[in-house]
Amino acid sequence: MVFEFARTIEAEKFDAARWEPYGWVPIPDTDPRDGRSTLFFEWGDAHLNLIGHDAGEVPHTAAGLGCEMLFRHRTHTQALMVLNCPAVVVVAAADATFGSPQDAAKLRAFLLRPLDAFVLHRGIWHWGPFPIDAPRVDMLNVQGRRYAEDNDCCRLGEVGAGVEVRTNGAPAH
């Protein structure tokens, strides 16, 4: 199957400063800033489990992966830690709207390594993480237990705003 994408975006290095518009990165308990950022679960249903995404869930291109949809949770934060392989995540601001191919410019992609951990603010649009070159990425996940009731989906492909995420040759560190 051939996919058409509005643009190609480069997956960039993941670090706390770059991630800040979308959430936060856990810091050591000895850091004086520890505790300034907290998890939020409007429904009081925080849940810890293991989740994963298979490579076959998304289209693959010569340069990387295709992002055709985003999800978000309005009632809770979500914390993830990649466990086993390099992966990529795509995000957009909570107030982003998608209705045309030009809206693909609102998306950013980040390369993740095993043991990279991050929190998504409530409402942040996200895709993945998906494995870059492994069959499956496994993750530690903290999110609302009733996430399926609070799981908005935006089908970027339907409005021509899907993106190709360039990962080939990009080191995940």
Image (spheres, rainbow, N blue to C red):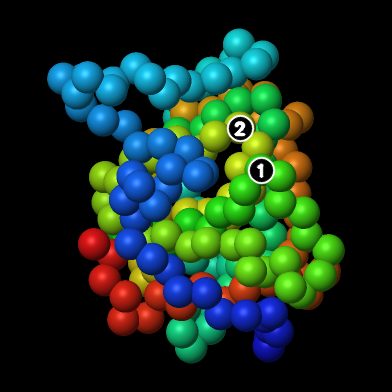
Placement of 30 over or under 98, stated as above or below: above
Tell me the residue at 55%/29% (across/down): 77
Near mark 2 (Cα within 10 A), the count class, few <14, some 14-19 or many ≥20, is many
Q: Which residue is mark 1?
A: 94
- Judging by the rendered image, the residue that carries numbered circle 2 is 122
Q: Residue at x 40, y 75 (%)?
A: 167
Residue 88: image quadrant is bottom left
Q: In this view, which residue lies farthest toward the top?
A: 44
Question: Which mark, by number, is residue 64?
Answer: none
Residue 135 in percent (x, y) is at 41, 65
Frontmost residue, 34 versus 157: 34
Residue 36, can we see it? yes
Q: Position of residue 126 (x, y in %)?
A: 59, 50
- SS of the residue at dot 2? loop
Which amino acid does the dot numbered 1 rest on?
A: Ala
Q: Nearer the viewer, residue 155 or 141?
A: 155
Marks 2 & 1, CB-CB < 8 Å contact: yes
Q: Earlier in the sequence, mark 2 or mark 1?
A: 1
Rendering coords of residue 171 (x, y %): 26, 71
Quadrant containing the N terminus in the rendered view: bottom right
Whether residue 130 is visible: no
Viewport quadrant of the C terminus: bottom left
Q: Secondary structure at mark 1?
A: loop
Q: Label 1 crowding class (10 Å Cα cut-off): few <14, some 14-19, many 20+?
A: some
Residue 145 vertical position relative to residue 110 in the rendered view, above or below: above
